């Protein structure tokens, strides 16, 4: 077993994402939009998966175990690995999930209520274990690890830009609004914009210092730490208060609740049945009313009076 420290270029990963992605349409939710005018907004924070991008993680077929096993096999091949036995690929998804759970347990033991992983580290552990057991063959480099991670993610959680995303961002880019992201994400999440919209986050109008990624903090939603970090930066760098911030997300527990508790105004994105999470089993979510509800991203313009 050999290991090098080479890393794939961002361009290579962008091309990989592009190659493994195909158009998807959101599934209507039947929700009626509620779009009151919301004056005084100076910044917008967006969730990514299920809000800016259609997330197809629930649409991998009637036999998810078989689908994940195929994805595992193809991801290993994309990383340049050969497999000693088909059993490895059948068992692989379970090994991957167990490695994530072990990481979560270790983080919780250190007091992190909602832990987040760095998926490249998880894959490194899984690949090293399989290599030690003689179940896979090939060099375990940073390049190989990221290729495997991106391949498996694209195959088990395919994404595509929500309708109207590029046009909506173009409208807000012409305003003085500060745009940011608060997302449960990995290092390759930001590359979705380059791969599927053809522009980097910065060129789409997002402020890099306002893009908060869970993998960097080690905390995941619904921890308020992610949104609080964005709000601290907005206040310190731009003098923007929470009440002047509009948070847009598809999950009442992970997006709307922490943002509202921190003083933001909130918009529930109810544009795709796959990813809409009302969380009516959570008492705090049952009592919570977002400031607005939209079913298409271009409805944001009505809320803010932008055109």
Image (spheres, grey):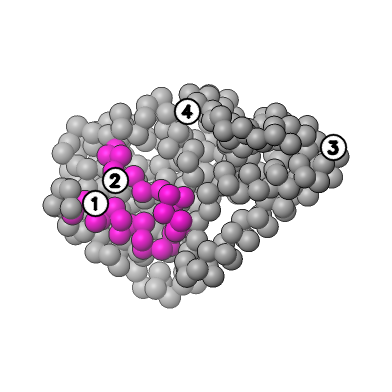
Q: CA distance from mark 2 to mark 4?
A: 21 Å
In reply to whether residue 187 is colored magenta, the answer given is: no
Residue 147 as seen in the image, left or right of residue 170: right
Give the label on residue 233, or none.
Answer: 1
Q: Position of residue 281 (x, y in %)?
A: 50, 72
Residue at x 27% of width, y 65% of height: 262
Mark 2: give few (<14), some (14-19) or many (20+) Cα within 10 Å: many
Residue indicated by mark 2: 210
Report if the CB atoms under discs 1 and 2 are less than 8 Å apart. Answer: yes
Report if the CB atoms under discs 2 and 4 are less than 8 Å apart. Answer: no
Query: What's the magenta region?
Result: 206-235
Between label 2 and label 4, give the one nearer the viewer: 4
Mark 1: give few (<14), some (14-19) or many (20+) Cα within 10 Å: some
Residue 252 as seen in the image, left or right of residue 6: left
**Which of these two is toward me, 208 or 26?**
208
Give the label on residue 10, or none.
Answer: 4
Mark 4: give few (<14), some (14-19) or many (20+) Cα within 10 Å: few
Under circle 4, the secondary element is helix
Disc tally is 4
Q: CA distance from mark 4 to mark 1?
A: 27 Å
Give the label on residue 159, or none.
Answer: none
Q: Earlier in the sequence, mark 2 or mark 4?
A: 4
Residue indicated by mark 3: 84
Q: Position of residue 137 (x, y in %)?
A: 77, 34
Q: Earlier in the sequence, mark 4 or mark 1?
A: 4
Under circle 1, the secondary element is helix
């Amino acid at each position: 077993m050999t290991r090098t420290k080479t890393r794939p270029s961002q361009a290579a990963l962008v091309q990989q994402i592009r190659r493994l992605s195909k158009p998807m349409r959101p599934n209507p939710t039947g929700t009626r939009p509620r779009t009151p005018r919301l004056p005084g907004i100076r910044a917008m924070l967006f969730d990514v998966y299920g809000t800016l991008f259609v997330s197809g993680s629930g649409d991998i077929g009637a036999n998810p175990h078989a689908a994940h096993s195929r994805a595992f096999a193809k991801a290993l091949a994309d990383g340049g690995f050969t497999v000693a036995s088909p059993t490895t690929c059948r068992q692989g998804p379970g090994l991957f999930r167990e490695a994530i759970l072990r990481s979560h347990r270790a983080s919780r033991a250190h007091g992190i209520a909602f832990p987040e992983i760095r998926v490249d580290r998880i894959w490194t552990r899984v690949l090293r274990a399989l290599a030690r057991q003689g179940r896979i063959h090939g060099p375990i480099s940073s390049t190989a690890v990221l290729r495997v991670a991106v391949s498996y993610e694209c195959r088990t959680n395919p994404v595509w830009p929500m309708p109207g995303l590029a046009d909506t961002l173009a409208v807000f880019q012409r305003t003085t609004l500060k745009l940011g992201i608060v997302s449960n994400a990995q290092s390759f999440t930001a590359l979705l914009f380059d791969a599927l919209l053809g522009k980097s986050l910065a060129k789409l109008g997002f402020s890099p210092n306002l893009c908060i990624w869970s993998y960097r903090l080690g905390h995941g939603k619904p921890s308020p730490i992610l949104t609080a970090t964005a709000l601290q930066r907005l206040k310190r760098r731009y003098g923007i208060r929470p009440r002047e911030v509009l948070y847009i997300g598809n999950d009442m527990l992970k997006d709307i609740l922490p943002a509202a508790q921190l003083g933001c105004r909130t918009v529930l994105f109810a544009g795709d049945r796959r990813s809409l999470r009302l969380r009516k089993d959570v008492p705090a979510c049952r009592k919570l009313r977002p400031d607005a509800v939209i079913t298409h991203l271009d409805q944001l313009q009505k809320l803010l009076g932008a055109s």
